[in-house]
Image: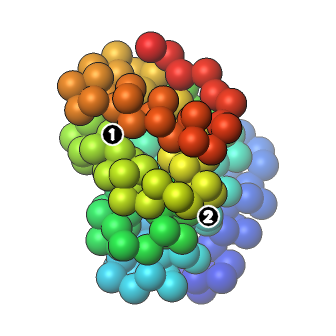
Amino acid sequence: MADEEDIGEEVGELDSKGEEEKRGAAIAALLQKSSTRLSESRGVLEFLPEINESCVDKAALKALVDGEAIGLIFSAMKTHCDNPQVLVAGCKALVFKGLKYQYNAPASQQVLGSGGVATIMAAIKRFPDDRDLQVAAIVALSHVVAGPENREALMRQGGVEVILDSVSRHNIRTSLPF
């Protein structure tokens, strides 16, 4: 298997339909290595973009969701909740190409089961003046709350008010599904 620097490239280089199993294995290896690096913020800042960039097609997306990448992202965000760089990277990592949370029950359940909405809301509240974080969090929320269970979680946690405050404070344009 490739070393850490080559895993992202290896995932992206697989193009043919017959390579789906290899892509799944490469993503599984990436997620395994990533899970061992949760305690160090530098490692987290390296693997969060790799997770998102590995989502190159439907097979990769399935491997990421099956590998519980979403839960891993939220674990990283919770572990490093005082580091706005990690929180921004985590929010950006949640916006997978082609993932529609409202149509992907396993992904939506991972958000709900990981306390994902609460994690993003805590980041918004903790760093209200960090515009980069606010934008990344609002974009991530616009994706993850598309699933009805997560939208309800957002409403229960008073998220609408927090989002409206952030959007108006930082002049963020967004379309949220509520």
Residue 129 location (% of width, % of height): 53, 58
Q: Quick check: 150 left or right of 21? A: left
**Dividing the picture into quarters, in which one does residue 31 lie?**
bottom left
Q: Which amino acid type is marked by label 2? A: Pro
Image mark for residue 49 = 2
Q: Quadrant of the C terminus?
A: top left
Q: Helix, strand or loop at disc 2?
A: helix
The quadrant of the image that shows the N terminus is: bottom right
Which amino acid type is marked by label 1?
Answer: Val
Q: Residues within 10 Å of mark 2 (few under 14, many from 20)?
A: some
Which dot marks residue 160? none
- Residue underneath mark 1: 117
Q: Secondary structure at mark 1?
A: helix
**Residue occupying the far front of the picture:** 169
Q: Is residue 154 above or below residue 22?
A: above
Query: Along the polypeptide, which appears first: circle 1 or circle 2?
Result: 2
Q: Residue at x 21, y 25 (%)?
A: 156
Residue at 36% from the left image edge and 59% from the top image edge: 126
**Spot occupied by residue 157 in the image (x, y as percentages of width and height):** 23, 32
Q: Residue placed at 22% from the left, 41% from the top?
A: 113
Nearest the viewer among 57 and 85 is 85
Q: In this orientation, which residue lies closer to the viewer: 169 or 149?
A: 169
Residue closest to the eye, 107 or 117? 117
